[in-house]
Image: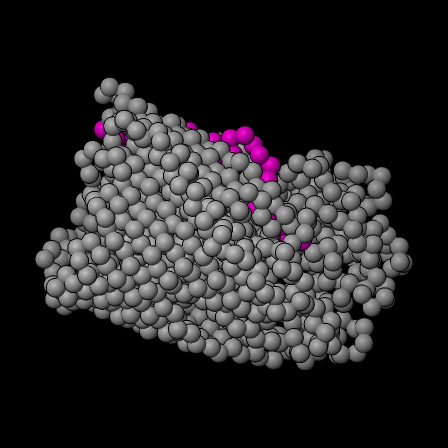
Amino acid sequence: MSDWKRIFRGHVAGWALASAMIAAPALAQDATVPADAPAQAADQAGGAADIIVTAQFRAQNLQDTPIAITAVSADTLAARSQTSVTDLGQFAPNVALAPATSIQGNAVAAFIRGVGQLDASFALEPGVGIYIDDIYYGTTFGAVMDLTDLERVEVLRGPQGTLAGKNSVGGAVKLFSKKPDSTPGGFVEATYGRFDRLELRGSANVPLTDDLFLRVSGVSKNVDGYMKLLDYGCVNPASGIPPSSGNKNCQIGTEGGIDVMALRAALRYAPAGSPLEINVVADVSKDKSETVATKLLYADNPSVRSYVAGDPTAGIPFDSRFLTGDKSYTSYATYATGGNYTTVFGIPTQIAPGGFTASPTSTVKAWGLSGTIDYDLSDSLKLKSITGYRSADGTSAIDVDGSPLAILLQEFTYDHEQFTQELRLSANFNDKVDLTVGGFYYKATDTIQGRSQIPTLLFDFLADDVVKNRSASVFAHGEFHVTDAFNIIGGLRYTDDKKSYRYSRRNVDGTLPSGAFFTPNFLLVGLDGLTGTFKGNRVDYRIGVNYRWSDELMTYAQLSTGFKGGGINPRPSAPDQVQTFGPEKLTTYEAGFKADLLGRMLRLNGAVFLNKYNDMQLVRYQCPESVVLSCSVPSNAGDAEVFGWELEAQLRPADGLSFDASVGYLDFDYKKITNPATLVTKDMIAPFISKWQLSAGVQYEADLGGNGTLTPRIDWSWRSNFYYNSVNNPYNLIDAPSLVNARLTYQAADKDWSLSVGVTNVFDKFYYNGVAENVGTFGVVTGTVGRPREWTATVKKSF
């Protein structure tokens, strides 16, 4: 993409053609309100509803907001069977949200327009900001949240450096809960489905007084695992590996099971006619789910063998015999230690079974408390304070080889605590200028504790690391209304970051490594008690214009910047690998339009952009300056350009009938690789870059003549293949499937109850959400297996 202007011209025609193809069915049809308008939207007779968003610090019509936003209501989330944050990427263009591989724990891999973060380490920053009622959540750990009792979800694409702020360089995912109000009511909902799925959801809105309102909501979700863990010795009795259990069916456990409970209470004080409104929210959740379903895809490491007492050179080697059926939901993982090894130092060693066993779980216990105060100082001057505290801790395990042998076995406990405070002062000057100034403060303390055993490196150590993160920023955002149709926008944010990482590396008995050659953990001598520190500051800006040509069409153009914070290497193999790296920076040139056409029966929004990506944070695997040549050190090691475009359409051609569709395109090109030790070459592409991403949905609400309504809905999503790692090779290339979901809902005439049946992954496609590939060091590749076809039946009662 060296000549991006040529590519831009080449794709304008395709962009226009796609617009025409989406718009074509709308001709000569009737218009109604679209299905995905949130509850707070104003109904528009004979046309689309006004969706209200708050991306620019004030309530605005989505169609007047010059940002690429996908806004989805709670009703649409339910109709699409979207119940988790990781489901949101299916129907937003150039957005990828997926469960992280098991080595990252209970975390989300989030990318927007190819910008994000795979590694869930607290030492690294997410490239996509996740916000819960405007509270920034500072890590990808514990971010696989349930979508319960939401008002809407906003997915913002492109750098939000001056608006959302911290680490929202790729974009932001914002969850907005339903606020308590003066209308009593609520619902209870029960779901049963495949794998003994049992879900209970409920919410109640209770006016306590004329000025004070309470809303309580909860969810309980239990689903059995779909990946069977098999006893290799039992399945293969003549293999020479003894069975590890006496189960007749040779099954020793499962992966992929879900066990979640959550409760949320919101209290709102909003006296009628008063300039003051106070919202206090408390939530608690417990996720005791199994680790993500993981399957062995490649096995070839003769240095790792089965345990044979008294002979460390003997044993059955780690090879393809431990692969299970190509598309079977089975694995031979044991989450237990034991085996014979030839170390990287050429010395044979062995570890007797039974010394270290991990649990195949991925748990999170979390709670949070937030308070938002809105005070109108005058008709044109408003003050907002947003205060939040969140805590999340959990345990996860990884059996990287997926076999009865043991190449790398880890079990860690994560703890995250954060405090945030944001102040905003917003003013309107004679309807000519809207100005917001403010400040943001973030402080987090994180710990990582656990055991890691890698026998070929003579590693078997306990870690107890402490990460401290402090960020402070001030910002200003202005909208200058030159005329009723023409606006100029400017924004500025200054951020100051500081982070420290204190390492603890000890033998399993609590002693320090001796440092004697070829004794356990001798490479780690000197790390215990060592602290690395990163400091940095950054100025981001946004400049833009937008023009409303008519009630039907608004266009905009902007230049915006953002960054992903720097940090410290979290996984040094020696003290000289305790190294810092700087922020990853992005500058985006973007133009777009928002249109309500054909009497508002068709909504069509699009954007075209060029990202200039500097100082990309890539992992380098060779450290010639270190006493340990092999390494895994995040470094600023590349510049790139990403050209792309997006289209979203919503169409209501007839009463009760609605269509929605989206298309995204990305073209990634490295411009410079500054550190060849990353093993990245200029012909490679960054992770999670799919050239094409498509989705479509259709539903029809059939009126049963006073007996209620019957609404069938079908959704389809697809993305072209993408690489999961920065070092591209066939082992980490993911061929994404076409996924189809379907749902049929009956709603009673008085709307007080409904019955729904749904099927996800209708055609039972076998696919992978991600891969953990390490052929060079460990001779192993494992894949995170997507969920198979599942059916559900849901009864909902409103009151």
State the residue in front, 25 or 654: 25
Q: Is 325 located above or below residue 442 in the figure?
A: above
Is residue 770 rendered magenta in the image? yes
Which of the image's four quarters has the N terminus? Answer: bottom right
Q: At 73% across and 71% down in the image, what residue appears?
A: 629
Question: Magenta residues, as a range?
Answer: 750-773
Q: At 23% across and 59% down in the image, what residue appears?
A: 487
Give how far across and how far down residue 772 sits, in percent.
64, 53
Q: At 85% across and 44% down in the image, what residue appears?
A: 240
Q: At 29% across and 43% down in the image, what residue appears?
A: 595
Residue 389 location, quadrant = bottom left
Total residue callouts: 0
Give how far across and how far down residue 528 sits, in percent.
64, 78
Give how far across and how far down residue 147 sits, in percent.
39, 47
Residue 77 location, quadrant = top left
State the residue in front, 261 or 140: 140
Q: Can residue 790 be seen in this view?
A: no
